[in-house]
Image (tube, rainbow, N blue to C red):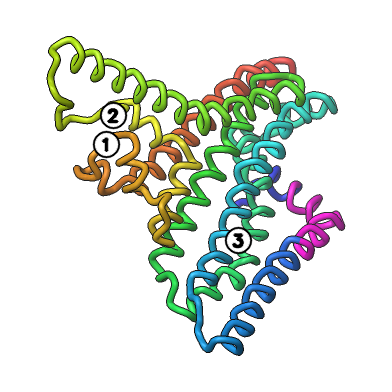
Amino acid sequence: MRQNPVYSREMKVSARSPRFPLILSLFNGILCLAALINMYSVVLRVRTNATIQYSSFMDIYEFVTAIEFILLMFIVPAVTAASISGERERQTLDLMLTTQMTAAQIVTGKLMGALSSLFVLILSSFPAVAMVFVYGGITWWDALSLIFCYVAVAFMAGSLGIFFSSVFRRSTVSTAVTYGTLIAFVAGTYFINRFALSMSAANLDQTIAAYAMEAPAIRASSGGAFYLFLMNPAFTFMAVIGNQAGRSTSFASVCSYFGMENTGFVMEHWVLLSVLLQLAAGVLLLWEAVQFLEPVKKKGKRKK
């Protein structure tokens, strides 16, 4: 199987740069230091009152996984949003398009090159995450669902950056639009649901006041707007971690806050459906990025 030449070049550049080993050492050093401090506090508690607080191990698990999620959601777009537009600015994109490489190879090579280094960073931190297994905090299925969540957010955020990088000629513009769109996915869906919930509560209060009756059993809800959270990577991550750690931020608590019943096919398979939708959105964005480059590719062939 022939290796993608763009991916091969990106990997060689990354391997020869001293930045990645430094980032890898600092990142894992911070996580390991936090894990050791946490374990030391547990040992001190055992020496003083002979009790073990298992929730402290879940605290370090949530800390590590949250750091990794933030890393993926905010660093991947910064890398991919300047991938193709950066080639334009360096005036090397036309040279790449006049070779035997297809536009799809350029797009996938850029995305794979950006994600590979970050996935190495994530996988290298799993020993700190696996500390929870020693004390029975999570299961292997929980870890697998967390990995699926990481893959979905990294793929969608990276595809979003690649798409806007192929649309806009300037890296600053593509980066700004990428982050704006990502914020719209995360914060926009939340505020839409808050608005829908407030409108539902206002209509319910007006109905009660108009007919002078007692408050009905039906409560306000955000309705169909709640399903917009399927495209919210932060909400999916919160659902995964909240259910694993048993916190108040679990999926059932959020459903109750927005007046939704935690029943039905969509609700029972929320994480799986959300991951599949985000992956499908990433594939669609990559396809659109290829379509933006295809006319340039064909134009370059005609000139040649």
Left or right: residue 79 versus residue 197 is: right
Hey, what amino acid is under mark 1?
Met
The first of marks 2 and 1 along the sequence is: 2
Location of mark 3 (residue): 64
**Which quadrant: the C terminus?**
top right
Location of mark 1 (residue): 260
Q: Nearer the viewer, mark 2 or mark 3?
A: 2
The first of marks 2 and 3 along the sequence is: 3
Q: Image quarter for residue 39?
A: bottom right
Q: Is residue 7 above or below residue 190?
A: below
x and y percent of residue 252 in the render?
A: 31, 48
- 22 falls in the magenta region: yes
* Label 2 with label 1: CB-CB less than 8 Å: yes
For the residue carrying disc 2, how many other residues have a C-alpha within 10 Å: few (<14), some (14-19), or many (20+)? many
Where does the magenta region start and end? 10-26
x and y percent of residue 89 in the render?
A: 82, 24
